[in-house]
Image: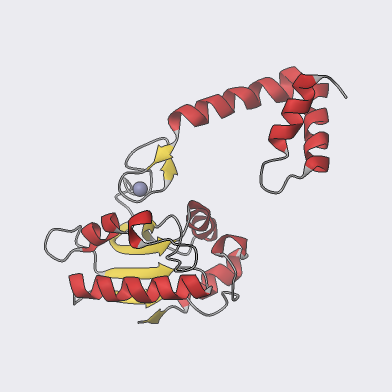
Amino acid sequence: MGGPEVERLIGLLARLPGLGPRSARRAALRMLQQPQARMVPLAAALTEAARAVKPCARCGNLDSRDPCGICADPARDHGLVCVVEGVGDLWALERARVHRGVYHVLGGTLSALGGTGPEDLNVAPLLTRVDAQDGEGIDEVILALGATVDGASTAHWLAERLRALSPALRISRVGQGVPIGGALDVLDDGTLAAAVRSRRSV
Ligand SMILES: [Zn+2]
């Protein structure tokens, strides 16, 4: 159907989250019917994003600038850091406009079963940032990790480490309204805002 070029295009599209083979075929067909209007700009945008976008060395956000636009924004509260599992969670919190501080992206959660330890995550840079002596002057950390078993144990572990580094640090956890096993980026903006506002100290 359509030759190897079309098969390859559909195969690549079908690997994207949210697109199965059927949606991939529809998307490919829509593009192939208007290649100049739909395909060429998309191909250019993909190439440009792949070249320019990298993790921010400070927080782990994906941006074409380093430090990223959030870390470089003087209007944000740099003493307030929200710790999230992934960039999708950061994007969700930004969409909901509930956090006026900066972020730190862990890149996952600790998992005894999955064999994920602190050295596999973006943990050491967080501890450096928060350090009371040599850090960035951070006075509050919000742990906005998913309400999974691994999310909860990661939050508990991190809270202990952070408190040991900086005894005066305020540490809170996002709780209410976060469904068990749910990732932050699937929550609607209102639920997310309520969850962040109702954070509790730990
Ligand atoms: Zn950043």
Across and down, in percent, residue 129 comes to 23, 58
Q: Is residue 38 visible?
A: yes
Across and down, in percent, residue 7 comes to 78, 27
Identity of the residue drawn at 34% across and 73% down: 157
Identity of the residue drawn at 20% across and 57% down: 136
Q: Can residue 196 be seen in this view?
A: no
Reply above or below: 64 against 38: below
Question: In which quadrant is the N terminus drawn?
Answer: top right
Q: Residue furthest left?
A: 133
> What sort of colour scheme is used for the picture?
secondary structure
Reply above or below: 3 against 88: above
**Front residue of 161 and 198:** 161
Identity of the residue drawn at 44% across and 62% down: 115
Judge left or right: residue 34 versus residue 113.
Answer: right
Across and down, in percent, residue 49 comes to 51, 31
Q: Quadrant of residue 202?
A: bottom left
Reply above or below: 151 against 104: below
Across and down, in percent, residue 154 comes to 40, 70
**Front residue of 146 and 175:** 146
Judge left or right: residue 163 versus residue 134.
Answer: right
**Front residue of 38 and 74:** 38
Q: Quadrant of residue 123?
A: bottom left
Judge left or right: residue 76 versus residue 198.
Answer: left
Judge left or right: residue 89 versus residue 14.
Answer: left
Q: In which quarter of the image is residue 180?
A: bottom right
